[in-house]
């Protein structure tokens, strides 16, 4: 569980999906096929990948973010009477050995092989869409290190969520502590900040910091992490890419620079698991990592333990 109290770096100033919200005075219309870079008004209808969707919020579709209607339930609802052309864009980038990012190394069939009993909330399309908002993930270092980063992220996620079964922590509590976290980050009345999402985001300070970085109000609406799959995945990537936890570097830097999987364990929960504190938990993470590396066709590399 990611319950460590941390100071937060200035690197968290990641904008809200580069989506510029626009005025909601344009008339609703059938807009044909959904397209990146297009401004949409509330009620606009689009076609995407054979389905029909209606806009819930006025916004401009971010270019290169992967935030299509199927992946963003906060912006689009299914249904409508808008018919588009016959060549809609693909649901997610097709995996290929020459591409960039997570979809270049992990196909949906491999994802399903890793998590055959997963909760449907944790979809492949939401995973890819979220990863695409962090351009450094699985794009830096050697190709082997990029594959290992995908395996390492998913291995830790598997451990935290019971192989993507649990969206919320079983033993719920308020987890409010105003002595740390971003300035002005208190606890909203009636809200609890127990673990949610793939890395089980915990404590009000982490919800505030992640929300500030992602451009969403998670202080007043922590439950959004359990409602919106892409936001849930993005909180996981936010921690992975920007936080050092109990370690000395981010989990991303550990994998991109070949330091080894063990350092990601130290970052995520080292204070409770590393240094012989809980070898069974460490081994569980290592077992996941080893299996996922085999599926992705890469060796585990060095320094798997902590």
Image (tube, grey):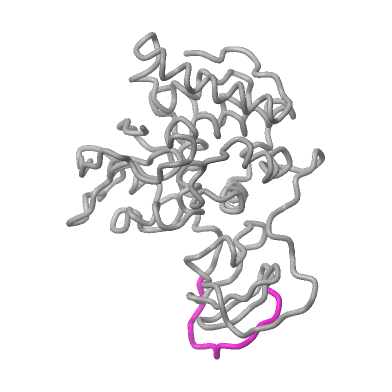
For the stretch drawn in magenta, what is the main secondary structure? loop
Extreme-bottom residue of the structure: 27
* Residue shown at 59% from the left, 64% from the top: 70
- Position of the N terminus, as image quadrant, is top left
Residue 278 in the image, given as x and y percentages of width and height: 36, 14
Question: In this view of the protein, which residue sits in the foreground, 212 or 194?
Answer: 194
* Residue shown at 41% from the left, 19% from the top: 281
Extreme-front residue of the structure: 117
The image shows residue 18, relative to residue 164, as above or below, that is below
Extreme-left residue of the structure: 189
Question: In this view of the protein, which residue sits in the foreground, 182 or 119?
Answer: 119
Residue 5 in the image, given as x and y percentages of width and height: 30, 32
User: Residue 52 in magenta?
Assistant: no
Give left or right: position of 253 versus 195. right
User: How many numbered marks, from 0 up?
Assistant: 0
* Residue shown at 72% from the left, 26% from the top: 144
The image shows residue 115, relative to residue 81, as above or below, that is above
Give left or right: position of 4 versus 19. left
The image shows residue 87, relative to residue 67, as above or below, that is below
Extreme-top residue of the structure: 276
User: What is the magenta range?
Assistant: 21-34
User: Residue 27 in magenta?
Assistant: yes
Question: In this view of the protein, which residue sits in the foreground, 172 or 266?
Answer: 172
Residue 173 in the image, given as x and y percentages of width and height: 21, 42
The image shows residue 127, relative to residue 293, as above or below, that is below
Q: Quadrant of residue 102?
A: top right
* Residue shown at 58% from the left, 18% from the top: 260
């Amino acid at each position: 569980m990611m319950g460590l109290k941390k100071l937060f770096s200035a690197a968290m100033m990641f904008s809200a999906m580069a989506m510029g919200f626009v005025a909601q005075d344009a008339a609703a219309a059938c807009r044909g096929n959904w397209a990146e870079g297009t401004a949409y008004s509330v009620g606009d209808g689009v076609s995407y990948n054979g389905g029909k969707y209606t806009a819930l919020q006025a916004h401009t579709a971010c270019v290169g973010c992967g935030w299509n209607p199927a992946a963003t339930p906060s912006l689009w609802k299914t249904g409508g009477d808008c018919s588009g052309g016959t060549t809609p864009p693909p649901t997610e980038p097709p995996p290929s050995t020459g591409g960039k990012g997570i979809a270049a190394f992990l196909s949906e069939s491999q994802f399903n092989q890793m998590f055959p009993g997963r909760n449907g909330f944790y979809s492949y399309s939401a995973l890819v869409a979220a990863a695409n908002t962090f351009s450094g993930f699985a794009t830096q270092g050697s190709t082997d290190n990029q594959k290992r980063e995908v395996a390492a992220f998913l291995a830790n996620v598997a451990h935290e969520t019971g192989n993507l079964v649990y969206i919320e922590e079983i033993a719920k509590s308020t987890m409010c502590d105003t002595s740390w976290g971003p300035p002005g980050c208190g606890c909203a009345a009636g809200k609890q900040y127990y673990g949610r999402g793939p890395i089980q985001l915990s404590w009000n300070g982490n919800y505030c910091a992640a929300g500030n970085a992602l451009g969403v109000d998670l202080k007043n609406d922590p439950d959004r992490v359990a409602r919106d799959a892409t936001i849930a995945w993005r909180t996981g990537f936010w921690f992975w890419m920007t936080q050092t936890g109990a370690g000395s570097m981010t989990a991303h830097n550990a994998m991109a620079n070949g330091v080894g999987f063990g350092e990601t364990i130290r970052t995520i929960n080292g204070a409770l698991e590393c240094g012989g504190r809980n070898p069974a938990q460490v081994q569980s993470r290592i077992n996941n990592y080893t299996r996922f590396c085999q599926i992705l066709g890469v060796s585990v590399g060095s320094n798997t333990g902590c």
